[in-house]
Image (cartoon, rainbow, N blue to C red):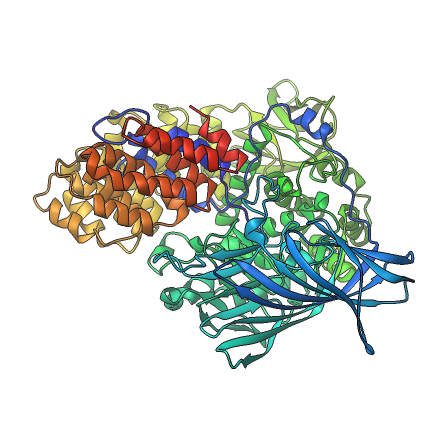
Amino acid sequence: MRIIIHFLIFIIFILIGFSCKTSQPPASNTISSSDTVNIIEYKSDSINVMSDSVNMGWEEDVLEFQYKSSRARLFNLRHTRLEVSFDIEHQILNGMATLELEPWFYARNRLQLDAVGFLVYHVWEVTDEGDTELQFVYDGEVLDIELGRMLSRDQSINVKIEYTARPDEVMTKFGDAIKSNQGLYFIDPEEKDPNKPTQIWTQGETQSSSHWFPTIDAPNQRCTQEVYITVDNKYVTLSNGVLVYSRDNLDGSRMDYWKMDKPHAPYLFMLAVGKYAIVKDKWRDIEVNYYVETEYEQYARDIFGRTPEMIEFFSNILDFPYPWQKYHQIVVRDFVTGAMENTTATVFMEDVQVTKRELVDENWDDIIAHELFHQWFGDLVTCESWANIVLNEGFATYAEYLWKNYKYGEDEAAEHLKDQLDEYLIEAEVKKMNLIRYRYDHPDDLFDRHSYEKGGLLLHLLRTYIGDDAFFKSLNYYLNQHQYNSVEVHDLRIAFEKVTGQDLNWFFDQWFLAAGHPELNIKTVFDDSVSQLRLQVKQTQDTLQFPVYRLPVKVDIWERGNLTTHQIVVDQSNQHFSFNCDTVPDLVLFDSDFALVGEVEHQKSPEEWYYQYIYYEEEARPRMNAIEYFGDYPGDSIGFIILKKAMQDSYWSNRFNALWAIDEWSDSIKVLVRDQVEILTADPYPYVRAQALAILSEEDSGSYTKIFGRALNDSSITVIGVALDGYLHSGALDVQQVAERFMNETNFYVVVALANYFIEQENKNHLDWFSRELDMLKPGDQWYFVSYYAWYLTDIPENEAAEGLKKLLHLAQGSPEGYVRGAAYKALEVLEDMEGVPGMLLKIRQEEKDPDVLDYYMTE
């Protein structure tokens, strides 16, 4: 599962928000500034892991939580048969569930099932002779059934339950990662929203499948499955397994029968209902279909079309062919997270649904690869408890790197690892946790940058240590040994030990079973008297709380352009290493594999950073770090030489980062590279073009009118958005006509450029445009756009702004996204001098149920 950040977005909104009225939104909110591309980068990475709320007392908080063991296996759930239909208007599911179970080991005469918020009508035992009513007690969460006799472990029972699920009426506790735990969701059930289709979909992870069918809702259970779904004929359905048949009913409805004949965990059960175009594809002889809204049918292959190649790639590197009957992917509205890897049927948030033009800038391969890899790691082999969730999410996160390296090259993959390390270290500033955590408040809280990014990085570190061949043979052994079963972290360790013949307790103990990461201080001294380089490595982390790490590390030493690589093992808190050298090295690069998961402080001179950029012409990561260094020291003469070189780097992201760094330097220095900046407005990569245009737009826009004008026809919508902002501020005679040309555009970057322009105009007749765009934007864009919307409302007569206030109130109360509700509330706060707004704010606070959003309301 991939998670959408929501609390972090609150914080960012504060940073880019507005607190007083000026002539226009602040620079950080305008698309004309170089921040534009940084915002684009943030948005492209927004499908990521939600960080825990900042809490410096995390050690004490963890100790307060009770130990969470794996769910005791009282019964073995063998098979689940569901017959469901819906009352969409009233948002209920009417169901008949038949469960086949047997005692796990000890004899049992009572059965407890998870069933949250149901109306339970009857419970029967089903036999060949007929159905026998069973007595039960139900408290709204657990269905306690008297079986009528003692069952031994070699006896099975079929229990049938007639029930109604009412998920919209149930409010349960949920954690930080997922915004709601209803389990079953009805989207626009009354068909009142013209911009939103009616849909039904489920989300089971972590413990929400029991909100729509009775089950043993634990990851260490596995069963086969049948689902009979009755819906209006205008809808299509999707569930796990294969569609066996569809039968029309006399009343205009249809029953679809989906069968899953391989066992999987209950949290991976799914169904979805809606009006969809189904675009068919295949991998070998297996169906691989894409379910999208009809207007995106022509783009489905552009979005998802690399899936068969991904399946082939993962099947080959694992030497383990895709294990299920099919693989379908579906896009739904108002999804509660980024995506979910239900077995054979992955659900994606609506942001994935884009046009071919939008895919010029950014594809969705990361999230598609992530969810696909779960079909092996998570669905085929499942963590036995949520404490071991890294065995699901760490592997899926590492799949993003594997696919990037295969499809887009080592440079893209190396940058991806760097970004993931940065993301983990940001979270580690406010909490450091074991990867295997048996103490937590809610299982959703485990879906963080530790379980995702750190987990993936540690797999790469282990691969670097034992080698590629051993790594992938170990994964193959692990999958074969534990397929269709549940595991804990020691099963993974043992798999690596079986293959390599090594004791890897030390690795798993320090990285998976202990908190923190190494913090290293590196110093080098050349002793001319003995022609030796002395390397001092100090582990500066608090060793009362965190381990003294054992770290196999590569050290590169460059002398007069010649490279020598040394393998060392750091395993003490303060350690010295000596290397023979003829002269003072040009450069010493510690951890030249860039595999360590931690912080390395190695003070290097500008000359050494220069050589790091020059000597590693075949590897993007060392050059990337050098560019980053010089970007932090504006005015350095050596840095200017490197950044100028980097503007012609072979890797597009290094060119982008060089532009970004140059933008922080003085205007007198920028003048020296202006010609190169202009050249980069025609770079092959859209983000480079966009950043170059953003730099030019900060100067006299009128000098670059022709460049901005040409870029208005760019293939990249990001480039068009930046160019449009520059053009509208260029003083060109036709700016009004150009603005009108783009007024029907719904892409976020173009919309923001127009909003910025309209706010600056004296003509205040664009409220209808602002309102329409706010309605049409996806939630991830709405949270940002509401600041412009509110700003516009402050500049028009209060009686005209009244409708806009109602729209903000509607968003603050009705958006399914907490971050959008929070943004709308903050926008209304800016307008609280207007009539009726204080009452609106009070009403919003009284009705809000999400504690994170309520906390955000209270921030200044």
Rendered location of residue 753, percent (x, y): 25, 42
Rendered location of residue 749, percent (x, y): 30, 46
Residue at 57%, 42% (x, y): give it: 177
Q: Nearer the viewer, residue 61 or 686?
A: 61
Q: Where, by quadrant of the figure, is residue 344 drawn?
A: bottom right
**Furthest residue to the top?**
529
Classify 183 as above or below 587: below
Q: Nearer the viewer, residue 191 or 616?
A: 191
**Furthest residue to the left?**
733
Q: Where, by quadrant of the figure, is residue 701 drawn?
A: top left
Rendered location of residue 234, percent (x, y): 44, 73
The reply to whether residue 683 is in sight is: no
Quadrant position of the C terminus in the picture: top left
Residue at 36%, 39% (x, y): give it: 809
Q: Which of 117 and 226 is in front in this view?
A: 117
Rendered location of residue 745, percent (x, y): 25, 53
